[in-house]
Image (tube, helix red, strand yellow):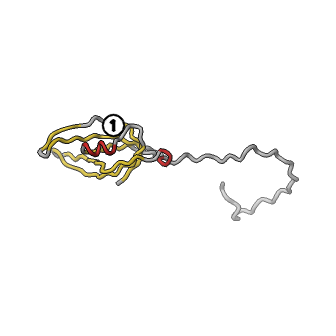
Amino acid sequence: MDLQGKVIAALEPRRGTSARGEWVVQSFVIETHDAYPKKMVFEVFGEERLQRFNIQVGQEVNVSFDIDAHEYQGRWFNSIRAFDVRLVDANMGVPPMPQAPDFGPAPAPTAAPAQPSSPAPEAGSADDLPF
């Protein structure tokens, strides 16, 4: 799965030792640019990935991740692990807000010849709209 957003927080790395040796994992929070922005916490596991991705607060990134869940003492927890994080070009990241076109100054109004008023449409005709 992929999600694009702005990195709004980088949590402190957590380190430990397992049977395979030392490990490090760091969590990051991104926020989407939807009409109702969403936030997601994801983890990057491994010193080499942390150095390769070089994630900084304020960057616009596209995160490719896997979601998994595990059970601990009768409760379930989600795990969102990033396997790729790519920096998004700032010019291409967020689509610009649409703006009204600028047509220049409005032309001066001209006097139009008087038009005869048209008769009112009949009830039930196609022109008889409620709005």
Q: Position of residue 63 (x, y in %)?
A: 36, 49
Q: Position of residue 41 (x, y in %)?
A: 32, 43
Q: Position of residue 105 (x, y in %)?
A: 75, 43
Horizontal side of 61 relative to 68 (left or right) equals right
Q: Quadrant of the N terminus?
A: bottom left
- Quadrant for residue 120, please give it: bottom right
Instruction: Name which residue lies at 68% across and 46% down.
Output: 102
Instruction: Name which residue lies at 86% across and 48% down.
Output: 111
Q: Position of residue 47 (x, y in %)?
A: 25, 42
Q: Which residue, as the protein is rendered here, is positioned at the far top? A: 12
Height in image: 85 above or below 122?
Answer: above
Instruction: Name which residue lies at 74% across and 63% down.
Output: 122
Disc 1 residue type (three-letter): Ala
Q: Nearer the viewer, residue 128 or 25?
A: 25
Q: Quadrant of the C terminus?
A: bottom right
Task: Identify residue for label 1.
Answer: 10
Q: Which residue, as the protein is rendered here, is positioned at the far left? A: 19
Q: Secondary structure at mark 1?
A: strand
Q: Residues within 10 Å of mark 1 (few under 14, many from 20)?
A: some
Instruction: Name which residue lies at 67% across and 58% down.
Output: 129
Horizontal side of 45 relative to 33 (left or right) equals left
